Image (tube, helix red, strand yellow):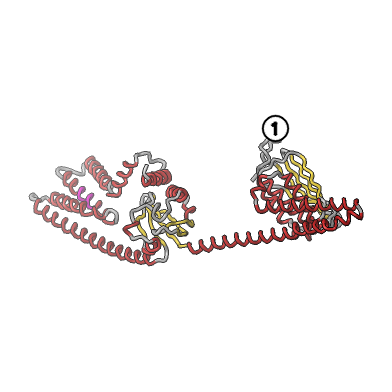
Amino acid sequence: MPESQDQENLGEKNITAVEQPAHQALPKSRLDAQGKWRQKDPLRGLIWGLLLILVGVLFFANEQQWLTGGLWWEALVIGLGAVFIIDALFHYFNPAARPYTPGRLSPGIILLAIGIVLMAGFATWWPVALIATGAALFFSSWVLQREIERRTSTQVTLQQSERRYRQIIDNANSLILEMDTRGNVTFINKFAREFFGYKEEEIVGRNALGTIIPETEQAREEHHRMLAEITLYPENYLHIERENILHNGNKAWVVWTNKPIFDETKKLSEILCIGIDSTEKRKAEILLEQQLKERTAMEERNRLARDLHDAVSQTLFSASIIADVLPKIWERSPEEGRKRLREIRQLTRGALAEMRTLLLELRPVALKDAELGELLKQLGESINGRARIPVEVHIEGNCELGAEVKTALYRIAQEALNNVAKHSGAEVASVNLTCQPEFVRLVIRDNGKGFEPGIKGQSLGLGIMSERAREINAQLSLQSTPGEGTTVSVHWKNPGFDAQTKTGPPAGHSGK
């Protein structure tokens, strides 16, 4: 099906479903014909009603024997003339039916005059009929002249209004255009033509899709959706920023206000689109976004450099110093030499774990592929090598977690262990991970100096850990007492676990 025909079907289907009353079951062509007939003469039933009243009055008068001899026909002619005159007056006072006044006034005056003449007893009535015809033509011409003058004045006023309207629209500093129900441009103001780079004859009559709207799949879908839904949800299209395309192929961003225009039958006829150029604003946003990314990347590089210097470099430097003095220590005391060897091994393992952690920071994809238990053990070794704090890691159960849950738990453990290394002054720490089909629990403990949670909790990264827990709908708790250490606990429930059947999908969903 051609694109324009497809758009027309979308628009007509939507309009018909929304605006056609439920009681109208007639075909559309027949309804249109009836509508035109009603609009042609809105008082078409008046004369028939008056005629029925006249006939009823004449029959009643005849039964009462009020009409004798030739009075019946004389009363009928006078009544017909009166009916036509009354009908003409109703048409004259109704602006929609005023053009039909002369056609009803003329026969009314003629019939009324003939009836009066007959009732008066004139034998030759045709001279009076001529006079009545002249009078009827005179009054009809007067009515027509008044109607012509009225229409001429109205037309001049409309032309002046349209001229002022065109001047205002063309000089407005806004993009203004109108589209029909198929998306074809029916009007575009001067400012919009200059903005998009089209001449009026180059764009009027053409579809907006492919001219000012790029022919991408997303743009095509959004354009068709607006044509189909604007009568149902007009509020959804009052303020929309979309990508447009200029005649030279350059892209531009415009904030559009789209408003449906209905005809007298409450049917969608056009869509009025008023736009404001937001290209510079969009470019500024993109530039700010790029600068933010660059600044974030710079901060991340600086952080990694600090971690590399503070952890790996210092650890390797300590290991190298011990290795330099190890031969002399071994000669003096082999037992002390073995102790120093174990210390070198611990330092090098810690440096290796720290390097692996930094590599994970540089390659986030590797973090999603690794097992959580191995990541926690690596974290423990890096803290041991960096802060000389032994970290015991215990894993219980099979932790087959999704990337989102695994990443959040790893980041929480990383933040908690960093706090242990920097602030706790602990001698030992532990990480316990329990994985069950229905839940996962992560507990990080240390025997450090502790703190008052209400005073220092936020400064020790509790906000970061809380945000990570909220991302996966987990519960985070922190317990600390001065002099007794700190415990950080995370409890996550598997939303896909069925408690009755004890089955469910792998614990890889965040429940969001």
Which residue is labeled 1 in the image?
501
Q: Secondary structure at mark 1?
A: loop
- Hey, which residue is sitting farthest left in the picture? 124
Q: Position of residue 102 (x, y in %)?
A: 21, 54
In reply to whether residue 85 is colored magenta, the answer given is yes
**Which residue is at a point 69% across and 34% down the rendered structure image?**
503
Q: Quadrant of residue 172?
A: bottom left
Q: Which residues are magenta?
A: 79-86
Characterize the magenta stretch by its predominant secondary structure.
helix
Q: Quadrant of residue 500?
A: top right
Q: Is residue 453 visible?
A: no
As drawn, is 380 to the left or to the right of 103? right
Q: Nearer the viewer, residue 334 or 224?
A: 334
**Which residue is at a point 78% across and 50% down the rendered structure image?**
349
Q: Position of residue 98 (x, y in %)?
A: 26, 55
Using a 10 Å C-alpha cutoff, classify the residue at mark 1 as few (fewer than 14 neighbours), some (14 to 19) or many (20 or more). Answer: few
For badge 1, the amino acid type reads: Thr
**Which residue is at a point 46% across and 48% down the rendered structure image?**
217
Q: Position of residue 366 (x, y in %)?
A: 66, 48
The mark total stands at 1
